[in-house]
Image (cartoon, grey):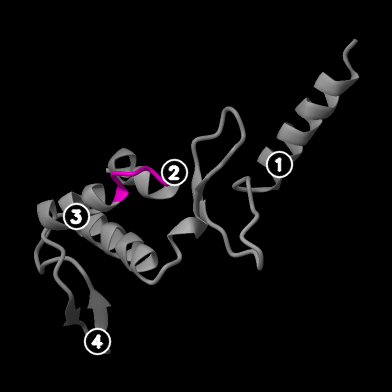
Amino acid sequence: MAAALRPAFTGAQDATATLNRALACHQAVPNLRGDPPILAFHRPGSDLLDAWAADAATALAMVIGVGQGQRLRACEAGACDLVFFDVTRNASRRFCGLSCQNRAKASAYRARRRP
């Protein structure tokens, strides 16, 4: 399911269609349950995969729907396949975390220093 939702983070042209398919396939329906009530987006009694997929697809659709889709990013480090939501003020984050950023910058520095 994570691979199916990845286009939303990479800015792919079919991200909207992918999310719409996931929402329909996993029957994402808003509902209140529990005491105190919480808002969930999966049908009552759904299995763990359907519940997670419906909630994740709904959250991504809400982010894109309010105009913040450009903040959904995939890490630019070569060997990393993580995705994240960019919370920086100017939406300039390129890496999922400091370890990927440090590795990429050290690699670029070493490449510049080679004769």
Q: Amino acid at mark 3?
A: Asn
Q: Amino acid at mark 2?
A: Thr
Q: Earlier in the sequence, mark 2 or mark 4?
A: 2
Q: Amino acid at mark 1?
A: Gln
Residue that mark 1 sits on: 101
| CA gap, disc 2 and disc 3 | 16 Å
Q: Check disc 4 and report its element: helix, strand or loop.
A: loop
Q: Earlier in the sequence, mark 3 or mark 4?
A: 3
- 111 vs 17, nearest the viewer: 17
- 49 vs 57, nearest the viewer: 57
Which of the numbered marks, if any, corresponds to residue 37? Answer: 4
Residue that mark 2 sits on: 10
| CA gap, disc 2 and disc 4 | 34 Å
- Residue 49 placed where, x, y %? 21, 50
Q: Which residues are magenta?
A: 11-15
| CA gap, disc 1 and disc 4 | 40 Å
Q: Earlier in the sequence, mark 1 or mark 4?
A: 4
- Residue ID at (27%, 43%): 1
| Residue at the extreme bottom | 36
- Callout in the foreground (1, 4): 1
Asked if residue 65 is positioned above or below residue 54 in the image, the reply reads below
- Residue 54 placed where, x, y %? 21, 59
| CA gap, disc 3 and disc 4 | 26 Å
- Residue 101 placed where, x, y %? 71, 41
Residue that mark 3 sits on: 20
Asked if residue 31 is positioned above or below residue 46 in the image, the reply reads below
Q: Check disc 2 and report its element: helix, strand or loop.
A: helix
Q: Amino acid at mark 4?
A: Pro
